[in-house]
Image (cartoon, rainbow, N blue to C red):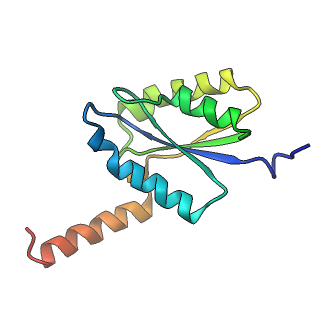
Amino acid sequence: MTSDADAPHGLILFAHGARDPRWAAPFDEVARRVREVLPGLRVALAYLELMPPTLAEAGAQLARDGCTRITVLPMFLGSGGHVRHDLPLLAQALREAWPGVRVDLLDPIGEQPTVLAAMADAAAALVAGGAA
């Protein structure tokens, strides 16, 4: 029998979604890089609207793959209405659909100190390099 410590951990990168599939390319790259750094982590993308899969679909697939813990990372710059209102309801529905799975929500990626520092560094480098 597999213990929780041995069970795969899932990460859902949760983004808004768009009609143009090219919009998702940066998120695909983030997922690829996370898989490269943490090869044992099950990484999935999910979207609020306009693109598949939904959070429910991505979470269900991770649960079927044996994940007993799923971390949801909103790929938003800040805590707007989708993050404050929609996402908690979607996460609760996932918990109710998969009661044996722990579902944790992180703060949006854009509010993480390392991301804020990287954006500031990139802005400064672009201006210093004459791009502005």
Residue plotted at (17% across, 71% down): 126
Residue 120 location, quadrant: bottom left
Horizontal side, residue 50 vs residue 109: left or right: left
Question: Residue 116 location, x and y as percent?
Answer: 36, 61
Is residue 104 shown above or below 26?
above
Seen from the viewer's position, the closer of residues 75 and 60 is 60
Question: Residue 86 location, x and y as percent?
Answer: 44, 26
Question: Residue 25 location, x and y as percent?
Answer: 33, 49
Horizontal side, residue 112 vs residue 67: left or right: left
Horizontal side, residue 68 vs residue 55: left or right: right
Seen from the viewer's position, the closer of residues 11 and 106 is 11
Which quadrant does the N terminus fall into?
Answer: top right
Residue furthest to the right = 1
Residue plotted at (34% across, 34% down): 17
Question: Residue 110 location, x and y as percent?
Answer: 38, 52
In this figure, what is the number of numbered marks?
0
Seen from the viewer's position, the closer of residues 92 and 1 is 1
Is residue 128 shown above or below 25?
below
Is residue 76 shown above or below 20?
below
Seen from the viewer's position, the closer of residues 14 and 64 is 64
Residue furthest to the bottom = 129
Residue plotted at (7% across, 68% down): 132
